[in-house]
Image: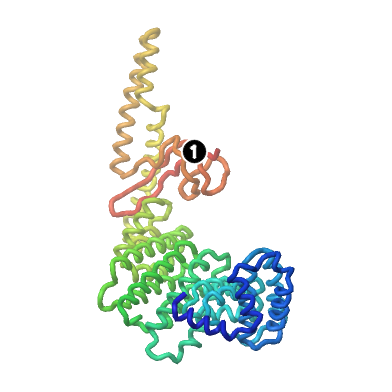
Amino acid sequence: MSQHEDDQSKGDHAAEPDAVAALRKVIQDRRLTKDFLETDEFRLILSGLRETILKGSPLEIWSSLAIAGRAASVSKPMENVFLPIVDQRVDAGLPPFEALQDGEDRWYLAKALQRNPSSQVAEIAFSEIVRDDLGEKARRVWAEVGLASAETREEFLRRINGIIDLLFRSVPNRSDTLARRIRRINSAISEKMVTSDLPAGSEFSHQLRILYTGHLSEEGPEERRLRDEAALELMASLTDFVRLSFSAASDPNSYLIAQDLRCWWRPASPPQEFEALSRRLVRHGAEALHVFARQGLRNDALRKSLVAIGGSSLLGRVAREIVDRDSSLPEDLSAWFSTGEEPAKRHSSAAVEALSGERLDTDVSRLLVFVRSSEFNGATIERIAEDVSELMPEEGKLISDVAGKAKQISQVVQSMAKRLHINLFLDTGEVVQFDPAQHDAINEGPIGANVLVVRPGTRKTEPNRSPRILLKPRVKHP
C-alpha cells in the first residue's frame, strides 16, 4: 500500500463506526480467537456491527461489510460467524455503492460479496473492474464475480466496455490515462478469461478489440514507454487467447487487434519484441486456417488478416511447413493455403496426359511398396539360394537367378519412383498418431490414438508443388 493510500485509510478509520473500529483493533491485536467469541466484549462488538450493517449510512454499511470480510478471513470459525451477516445484508438489498479508500478493505469487501453474487453485486463488480485505480487485488476478485455472472465471455467484455465508455467519455486527452487503466484491467481479467469455461460468444474477438484499442486514438498512448509496454502486454494476452481458443483463432477480428497495435508506431516500425509476438500470432492463426482447409473451406477473411499482420512471405512459409506435415490436402487447397491463389490451370489438351500420369503414379507407388517389402528382398533370397544349393545345386542356381532379377526389378522401380518424385511415407514398425486423412486403418480406433504402421505409404513431392499422398500407409490399432 502507498503512503498516500495508507494516510487516507487512517483518516477513514478515525471516522469509522465504533463497532468497525473496535473489531479492526481486535484483529490487529490478534485477539480474534475462538475463546474471544465467548466474551461480553465480542458480543457487544458483534451487536454493534449487525446494527450498523442493517441501519447505518451507505459508507458505514460498506465499511462494516469490509471489516466483516476481513474478520471472516482469520479462521474457519470466524467465517461461520461473519459471512452469514454479509449474506443477510446482500439478500436484503444493498445501498448505493461507495468505494472505500483502503485497498485491503476493498479486497476483503470483494471477497465477502463474492460468495453471494446477486445482480447488485455483479453490477458493482463490473464497475469496480473499471473504476478502481490502485486495488489490483480487489479488481481480480471483481473479475471473478463478473465472469461468474456472465453467460459468455463476449457479454463480460461488453459490460466492461460499456462502463469504460461511461466513465471516460468526457475525459480530455485521455489516451495515456485510459491506456494505463486498460493495462490494469487486462492484467486482472486476461488469465481468468483464457481459462474460463464460459463460451466465447460470436462477438468475443470484436469486444476484445474494442477493449484493447477501440477506446483509444489510432495513434495510441503519447508516452513512448507506456505505448511500448502496453502494446507488448496486450499482444502477449492476445496471443494466449488465439493459442488456447479456436473461436478467437478463427476470427479475423483477433488479428485486426494486432494491426491496430502496430499502427501505434506508424510511420516507424514496432520493436523486435512486438515482431516476435506477431510471428507467433501468425503461426497460431495458420493452424486455424489449416483446420478450415482440411474441411475443404477457404477462409479468405482469416487469411487476409494473417497477411495483414505478418506479410504474405511469412504466412506462405508457415503454411508450407504445415502442408509438408500434412500431405492430405488436395492440390488446389494446398496451393491456396500457401499462396492465396489457385494452382496454375492445366491446358485442356493435357487432361488425358494428366489422368494417365495419376494412374502411373498409383501403379509405381504400389510397385515401390512391393519391392521394398521383406518378401521381395534380394539379399534374403540370395541367402535362401545358398542354403538350397548345398543340397540341390540346380534349384539353388534357379533361386539365385530369381534373386538377381528381383534386384534388377527393384532398381528399375526405384529409378522410376525417383524420376516421378515418389518416395515412401512412413516405415513398417513406426508408431504414429492415427489420422484418417493420412492413414488407412485395418481396424477401428479413435482419431489421435497411437497406431503401428504395418505397410508404408507413398508421397509425391514435386518441386514448387505441395507434397501429396498417393498411397496411404496402412496402420493397425493396438
**What residue is disc 1 on?**
452
Q: Residue at x 40, y 83 (%)?
A: 177
Q: Residue furthest top?
A: 391
Label 1, residues with CA under 10 Å away: few <14, some 14-19, many ≥20: some
Q: Residue furthest left?
A: 268
- The reply to whether residue 320 is in sight is yes
Amino acid on which disc 1 is placed: Leu
**Position above or below: 447 against 6:** above
Q: Residue at x 56, y 71 (%)?
A: 141
Q: Position of residue 241 (x, y in %)?
A: 46, 66
**Front residue of 183 and 242:** 183
Q: Position of residue 229 (x, y in %)?
A: 35, 72
Q: Position of residue 417 (x, y in %)?
A: 32, 40
**Position above or below: 138 against 175:** above
Numbered disc 1: secondary structure: strand
Q: Position of residue 306 (x, y in %)?
A: 37, 68
**Front residue of 188 and 322:** 188
- The reply to whether residue 340 is in sight is no
Q: Quadrant of residue 293?
A: bottom left
